[in-house]
Amino acid sequence: MSIRVFLADDHRLLVEGFRHALKDFNIDVVEVAYSLEGLIDRYFEVKPDVLVIDVRFDSKNVAENGLDICEELLAKDPKAKIIVFSQFDDQYIIEGAYKIGALAFVLKDESTEILDQAIRTVAEGREFFSPQVAQLLARSSVKDRNPTKLLDEKELRAFLLTADGESLADVAEAMDLSTKTVGNLLKSIKAKLDIDTPADFTKVAIRFGLTTTELKSKS
């Protein structure tokens, strides 16, 4: 029995190309969507074995993307089997896809054989990591530096204040320390987290969901 796939992507030539190529793998693309409009309703009408969906669509609603649809669909049907199919290898997008419940993330420059493997694995309800995606995730995990795990109490306080946009003098005043001491703390923080600019502090804080308010609630 062939696997029934719903393929959602706004690139029509790509959709037709993969629809044709997947026939050789006994995979039947039973429905296609070129936009996000009405996609969830169509999914429930078709009830495919697997949904393969792109992240970014040329949509009037620029605030909505493929991951938003995935999250909404999984809230309605937690058993939905989803593969995110994208040209973007951004680790945050990849991690986000798995976090919301997608079972696989496949890059568009990977082979049809990889997409076939992903579809078959996901159809069985199992997660699939393509070689490229597995490598990207492994590399990013090595680079991940969680401030709450690597910094001591004073360093974390200085980190959060700096991430919130406070100047060196402001941080020193808030912590009742000399600017020299705070300067040394910031040097240590930069070395431990492998960051450099104030913007880097903010990006890392956002990534790990850290704020000075959160720190106060824990103290």
Image: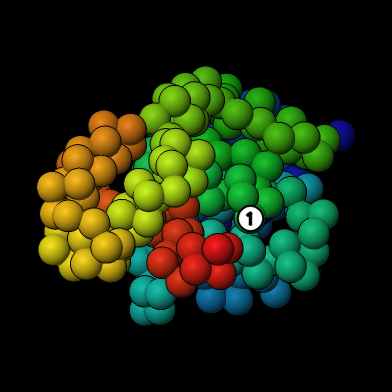
Q: Residue at x 46, y 52 (%)?
A: 208
Q: Is residue 105 left or right of residue 40?
A: left
Q: Which corner quadrant holds the C terminus?
A: bottom right
Badge 1 local density, few (<14 within 10 Å), some, or many (20+)? some
Residue 6 visible within the image: yes
- Compared across the picture, whether 95 is left or right of 126 comes to left
Location of mark 1 (residue): 100
Residue 154 point in image, percent of width and height: 37, 49
Instruction: Residue 28: name its quadrant.
Output: top right
**Camera-nearest residue between 199 and 121:** 199
Q: Nearer the viewer, residue 139 or 39?
A: 139
Residue at coordinates 36% horizontally, 66% vertically from top-left? 58
The amino acid beneath tag 1 is Ile
Q: Position of residue 211 (x, y in %)?
A: 42, 65
Residue 68 visible (yes or no): no
* Secondary structure of the residue carrying numbered label 1: helix
| Viewer-side residue, 42 vs 217 | 217
| Residue at 37% over, 79% down | 60
The reply, left or right, for residue 24 in relation to residue 3 is left
* Residue 53 place in picture, x, y as percent: 55, 52
Q: Looking at the picture, how far across and down is residue 55, in whole percent?
A: 46, 55
Q: Residue at x 27, y 52 (%)?
A: 201
Q: Quadrant of residue 70?
A: bottom right
